[in-house]
Amino acid sequence: MKFLIQRVTKAQVDIDGETVGKIDNRGFLVLIGVGEGDTREIADKLIKKMLALRIFADENGKTNLSIKDVGGSLLLVSQFTLYADCHKGNRPTFNNAGNPTLANELYEYIIAECKKEIPVVQTGRFGADMQVSLVNDGPFTIMLD
């Protein structure tokens, strides 16, 4: 499982010209990739780590505060292309990505678990062709896997 976490000041997901998920304050846009063999236990570890990351500035300008500390929001987007393998040729393969049934189940689980901890959790739509826009704050981007 992979979480690509981008600290943002705002972000949104549009599908066919309609906004389906949007955060207007600081928080994380998280691209979530599920691989074969991933489990809820793995998801739990990544969720715990993500919510504890101290990557927001404190009153002294040090990255010392978590998303909970700053009352931040989450925008969670399923992204199987995080499992792209480009070692051979120029066309990526996605053989290590989890099957759609497993991936959707774990994506929905991650959303539900995050909603227990963070008041504002927005999402994309699993399997949809989405347009994602964001203002990356920093920029600050971290990969958890």
Image (tube, rainbow, N blue to C red):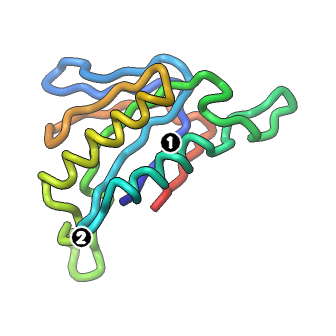
Query: Is 26 placed above or below 129 here?
Result: above
Which residue sits at x=45%, y=62%? 145
| Residue at image coords 27%, 63% | 35
Between residue 119 and residue 128, name the one nearer to us: 119
Q: Residue furthest right?
A: 60
| Image location (x, y in percent) of residue 52 | 62, 43
Residue at x 24%, y 55% (from the top left corner): 80
Question: Which circle marks residue 96 in the picture?
Answer: 2
Q: Secondary structure at mark 1?
A: strand
Image coordinates of residue 134 in percent, x first then y, are 43, 31
Query: Is disc 2 surrounded by few (<14), some (14 to 19) or many (20+) residues within 10 Å?
Result: some
- Residue 6 bears which disc, if any? 1
Pick the residue in front: 82 or 116.
Answer: 116
Residue at (14%, 43%) from the top-left corner? 127
Viewer-side residue, 134 vs 65: 65
Classify residue 15 by image quadrant. Answer: top left
Q: Residue furthest bottom?
A: 88
Quadrant of residue 7 within the rendered picture: top right
Mark 1 or 2: the one toward you: 2
Q: Label 1 amino acid? A: Gln
Q: Residues within 10 Å of mark 1 (few under 14, many from 20)?
A: many
Q: Residue 1: percent from the left, percent from the top?
A: 36, 60
Closer to the chain start, of discs 1 and 2, is 1
